[in-house]
Image (tube, rainbow, N blue to C red):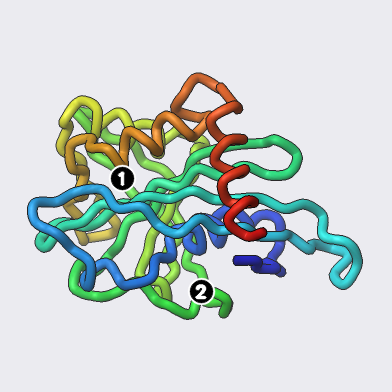
C-alpha cells in the first residue's frame, strides 16, 4: 500500500502513526476476549514535502500492533523506518472505546495540540500530545519524554497506565505480552537493541509478497 503524505514535516510523524495503525476492520469489530495484541497491515508511504510534484523526499515503512479491550482504551504501538535508515517508535491511544478508528486515513483532519499527563508506575509525565478527532486517536512521540518506550516497558512489567487530558482520564489497555507483541519487539530496531537484520528480513517478505 503506497501513500503520498503531503504534510508539513512537523506533522509527518503524527500522520504516519495514525496511518500505520490502519487495519482491515475497526477495533470494535475484531476484539477478542481476553484483551490481546493484534497486528495491523504494514504501511509503505512516501513523503513529498516542500518540492511537491518532484521526486519524493523519502519513503518509509510502518509496522504497528494495537491492543484490544471492551472497557479500556486501546493502544497502538508503531515502529517506523525511513529510507534514510532512521527509526523510531510512536504510540497512539483510542479515545472512545466504542467508536471505530476512522477509515478514511488519506483525508487530512484538524489537529488539536494539547498536553496530556501519563500516570505510569507511580510517576506522572506531562507531555505534548496531538488529538485528531476524525481518527479518534491521541498520539504521542518520543520527545521530550519517551512515552512510547514507557508504554512498551509497562507491558513487560504488567504496569497499569492511565492518561489524563483536561478533565478526562483514560485507562489504557496494555495486555500482557503474547506472540504478536513478541514478534513486534524482535523486529523493531527500537526494541531489539538496534539490530536492523530482523527489520530487513521483514521488509524482504513484503517485497516478495508484492512481486
- Compared across the picture, whether 191 is left or right of 95 comes to right
Q: Is residue 71 left or right of residue 183?
A: left
Judged left or right of residue 36, residue 139 is right
Looking at the rendered structure, the number of numbered marks drawn on it comes to 2
Residue at image mark 1? 117
Q: Which is more N-terminal, label 1 or label 2?
A: 2
Residue 177 appears in view: yes
Q: For label 1, count other residues whose C-alpha is less than 10 Å away and answer few (under 14), some (14-19) or many (20+).
A: some
| Residue 156 image position (x, y, % from top left) | 24, 27
In which quadrant of the rendered image does the C terminus lie? bottom right
Q: Residues within 10 Å of mark 2 (few under 14, many from 20)?
A: some
* Camera-nearest residue between 13 and 87: 87
Q: CA distance from mark 2 to mark 1?
A: 26 Å
176 in relation to 64, above or below: above
Work out whether 56 lies above or below 156: below
Front of the two marks 2 and 1: 2
Residue at figure coordinates x 29%, y 74% from the top left? 100
Image quadrant holding the N terminus, namely bottom right
Image vertical order of residue 117 relative to residue 7, above or below: above
> What secondary structure is marked by label 1?
strand
Disc 2 is placed on an element classified as loop
The residue sitting at the top extreme is 193
The residue located at (70%, 68%) in the rendering is: 4
In the displayed structure image, the side of residue 73 where residue 102 appears, left or right? right
Q: Nearer the viewer, residue 5 or 9?
A: 5
Q: Which residue is mark 2?
A: 105
Q: Position of residue 36 (x, y in %)?
A: 19, 48
Amino acid at each position: 500500500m503506497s501513500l503520498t503524505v503531503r504534510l508539513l514535516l512537523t506533522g509527518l510523524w503524527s500522520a504516519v502513526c495514525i496511518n500505520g495503525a490502519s487495519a482491515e476492520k475497526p477495533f470494535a469489530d475484531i476484539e477478542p476476549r481476553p484483551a490481546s495484541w493484534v497486528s495491523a497491515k504494514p504501511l509503505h508511504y512516501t513523503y513529498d514535502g516542500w518540492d511537491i510534484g518532484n521526486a519524493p523526499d523519502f519513503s518509509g515503512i510502518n509496522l504497528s500492533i494495537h491492543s484490544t479491550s471492551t472497557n479500556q482504551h486501546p493502544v497502538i504501538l508503531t515502529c517506523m523506518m525511513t529510507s534514510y535508515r532512521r527509526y523510531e517508535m510512536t504510540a497512539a491511544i483510542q479515545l472512545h472505546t466504542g467508536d471505530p478508528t476512522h477509515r478514511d486515513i488519506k483525508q487530512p483532519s484538524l489537529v488539536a495540540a494539547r498536553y496530556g499527563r501519563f500516570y505510569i508506575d507511580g510517576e506522572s509525565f506531562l507531555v505534548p500530545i496531538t488529538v485528531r478527532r476524525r481518527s479518534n486517536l491521541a498520539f504521542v512521540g518520543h520527545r521530550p519524554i519517551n512515552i512510547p518506550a514507557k508504554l512498551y516497558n509497562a507491558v513487560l512489567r504488567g504496569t497499569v497506565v492511565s492518561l489524563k487530558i483536561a478533565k478526562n482520564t483514560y485507562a489504557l489497555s496494555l495486555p500482557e505480552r503474547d506472540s504478536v507483541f513478541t514478534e513486534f519487539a524482535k523486529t523493531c530496531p527500537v526494541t531489539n537493541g538496534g539490530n536492523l537484520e530482523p527489520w530487513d528480513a521483514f521488509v524482504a517478505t513484503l517485497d516478495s509478497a508484492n512481486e
